Image (cartoon, rainbow, N blue to C red):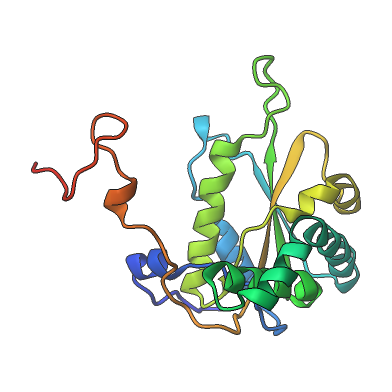
Amino acid sequence: MDAKPAIDLFEAIYTTRAMRRLKPDAVDPELIVKVIEAATMGPSGGNRQPWIFIVVRDPALKSFIAERYRKAWSVYFGAEARAIAEHQPHSPRGKMLRSADYLAEHLAEAPALIFACVQRYSDPRRAGQPMYGAIYPSIQNLCLAARGYGLGTSITTMHTMFADEINRELGVPDEYANLVMIPIGYPKGRWGMPNRKPALTVTFWDRWGEHRDTAPES
């Protein structure tokens, strides 16, 4: 497998949006290893590298996870998704909920599910807390690398509602937190920039509340 990403870094950053509608086409395991390798290039305090990634491709396991994911989705967003689909189907939130609803209904069809697990702190001050500062940069690296190979991803934590069952099925030990699930596959949709607020509207200079209409001079 000699495929190489052919995409500018900033194009990847600006167009790596959630791709929840995935084709069932198989993804070369070597590509999955490449995107996980990119994830391991993320920073971690003391270079602990406290992450473990579980790649689920087994159909029976995917079905087990999908059933629980669908239940969690129904509890948290099912009623809202149905209401918005009926009354505001073309609103930004309506579009988002439709795509998320699609993922919930078709999760088992994704060629692979990647679970990002991270070690828990053992020192008394933070005992049991996951090392959040390490896992989320690595997940973003994974998603950007997948974009470079033309693979779609989305980041979801909905599975954690059934964490005990899923972790038991996957064999995740107690000293690790199974925080994020990333379905990965070739997308059915098109890449594009997500709708975001302008950077200056979410930036303060020197103190909270200090806006500028333009970036200050050097």
Q: Quadrant of residue 20?
A: bottom right
Residue at the limit of the structure toward the top, as seen here:
124
Residue 215 in picture, x, y percent from top left:
16, 47
Q: Quadrant of the C terminus?
A: top left
Residue 192 can be seen, yes or no: yes
Answer whether residue 28 is visible to the viewer in this image. no
Location of residue 163 in the rendering, given as x and y in whole percent from the top left corner: 83, 47
Farthest left residue? 217
Q: Nearer the viewer, residue 163 or 58?
A: 163
Residue 177 screen position, x and y as percent: 74, 40
**Residue under the point 31% across and 57% down:** 198
Q: Which quadrant is home to the N terminus?
A: bottom right
* Residue at the (52%, 37%) spot, across then down: 44
Q: Residue at x 68, y 29 (%)?
A: 129
Does 210 sit above or below residue 184?
above
User: Measuring 61% from the left and 77% from the top, which residue is drawn there?
Assistant: 89
* Camera-side residue of 42 and 95: 95
Above or below for 124 versus 86: above
- 217 displayed left or right of 128: left
Q: Residue furthest front?
A: 87
Total marks placed: 0
- The image shows residue 25 at horizontal and vertical percentages of 70, 85
